[in-house]
Image: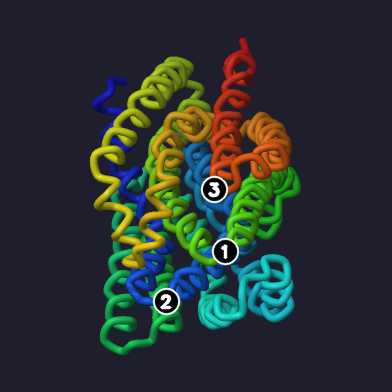
Amino acid sequence: MTHRTYLSLAIPLIISTITTPLLGAVDTAVVGQLPDPAYIGGVAVGTMIFNTMYWLFGFLRVSTSGFAAQAYGAQDAKQCFLYFVRPFLIALAVGILFILVQWPMKHIALTLIHPDEKVMTFTDEYFSIRIWGAPFTLANYVILGWLMGMSRVKISLFLQVFMNLLNVVLDLLFVNVFHQDVNGVAAATLISEVAAFLIGMYIVLKSSDLRLFSIPSSELWNAGEFKKMMAVNRDLLIRTICLLTVFNLFTARGASFGTEILAANAVLIQIHYIMAYFLDGFANASSILVGKAVGAKDEALYKRTLSLTGQWAIISPLFMMLIYILFQDSIIPVFSKNQNVIELASSYSIWVTIFPLAASFGLILYGVFTGATMTNPIRNSMLISLAVYIVCLFILIPMYYNHGLWLAFIVFSLGRSVFLAMYVPALNRTLFKK
């Protein structure tokens, strides 16, 4: 396998995954053009709440992709379909539960974050609309994960781009034409998520000759398969809880510095998300290839994928850093026209500049481990990195305030890379044992 072959898979996945943070980024950018920074603060806090809810179940996409890739590599059509149905049913159940418990969930979140009164009002409006998309959002995770695992990369790209283009159009329509501010932004995202779900389900059903009613219940609810799936999902859930703890602590501590710093951090975090999801495109490519290699018992494909993964974990962050250094003065104002917010974001911009270099190996190697469905190292490395992050918060914030907050985040990102890379030799010994 050549660099060209790897990139032919990675580039569509980069475009596909990088559209994910654009749902939040577009929302932030549109309300950032409104004069009051409380709008951007309200959407930032609302987005954080939904990230907390949805990221907890982000394993639905990741594990679905890994298991589907292995079944695809083994050329087992029935298992491919079952690896879609099982997490899909979980996604729908959890999404409906979120709707049922929306009021206490919102109250607890706002009590913990405790933004000022105006930001809280806008957050409440945003949340009350977007919550109705919960079942569709979680089901979309499964749909996209399955399509990626089945190497339907162009279709997954189409689905993601469609959802985000629709979101952009509706954002601009509802906010700039109908003057619906936060309500319009939330409604645009909700409609986009539902539309993507409907199209995605049509694609999945057209991609398989099997249907739910054609699968015996003993196979659908196979205890061994569920145990294997839940073991992987448990580790990925713990990983997600660690990430959410990091970002929630980051947002909460940033909010304690005032509304304008909260808004400035929100802008930079959106830029960081775009960088992280750019790297996630390489991780997805590696996950698909490693999953195929494991399913087909192709050791040569695994070793070549690992080699290319390492090389692009060095090349890609250098490319992103160069682009951001050259264009940061044009990028930041896209997210806000408030001059104080722009100036504050620029003053902390150095941390976003060095983020890709610190995080690249942790983010891209993640795909290798999920493709192999060996997730203990992911869990362990994240727990260690979180512990380091919390210690850094206590030490660095009193010394450097918001700069200290960002430095702690960079240390956490570097920790993810170092601690996960340490498990690669063990992974090599475990796979393809003679």
Residue 392 can be seen in this image:
yes
Q: Which residue is mark 3?
A: 64
Q: Is residue 183 above or below residue 230?
A: below
What secondary structure is marked by label 1? loop
Q: Quadrant of the N terminus?
A: top left
Which residue does the image show at 60% across and 68% down from the upper left?
Answer: 92
Q: Which residue is mark 2?
A: 36
Considering every residue shown, the one lying at the far top of the view is: 434
Can you give x and y, in whole percent of width and height, for residue 383 in the image?
Answer: 71, 36
Q: Is residue 63 above or below residue 91?
A: above
Can you give x and y, in whole percent of width and height, for residue 186 in the image?
Answer: 45, 77
Rounded to the nearest angstrom, the CA distance separating label 2 from label 1 is 14 Å
Identified by mark 1, the residue type is Gly
Can you give x and y, in whole percent of width and height, for residue 311 in the image?
Answer: 37, 20
Query: Closer to the camera, 158 or 325?
Result: 325
What secondary structure is marked by label 3? helix
Q: Is residue 408 above or below residue 188?
A: above
Disc ID at residue 258: 1
- First of labels 3, 2 by sequence position: 2
Which residue does the image show at 49% across and 30% down from the upper left?
Answer: 358
All told, the count of numbered labels is 3
Q: In which quarter of the view is residue 200 placed? A: bottom left
Rounded to the nearest angstrom, the CA distance separating label 1 from label 3 is 40 Å
Q: In which quarter of the view is residue 178 placed? A: bottom left
Can you give x and y, in whole percent of width and height, for residue 297 in the image?
Answer: 51, 22
10 Å crowding of disc 1: few (<14), some (14-19), many (20+): few
Identified by mark 2, the residue type is Asp
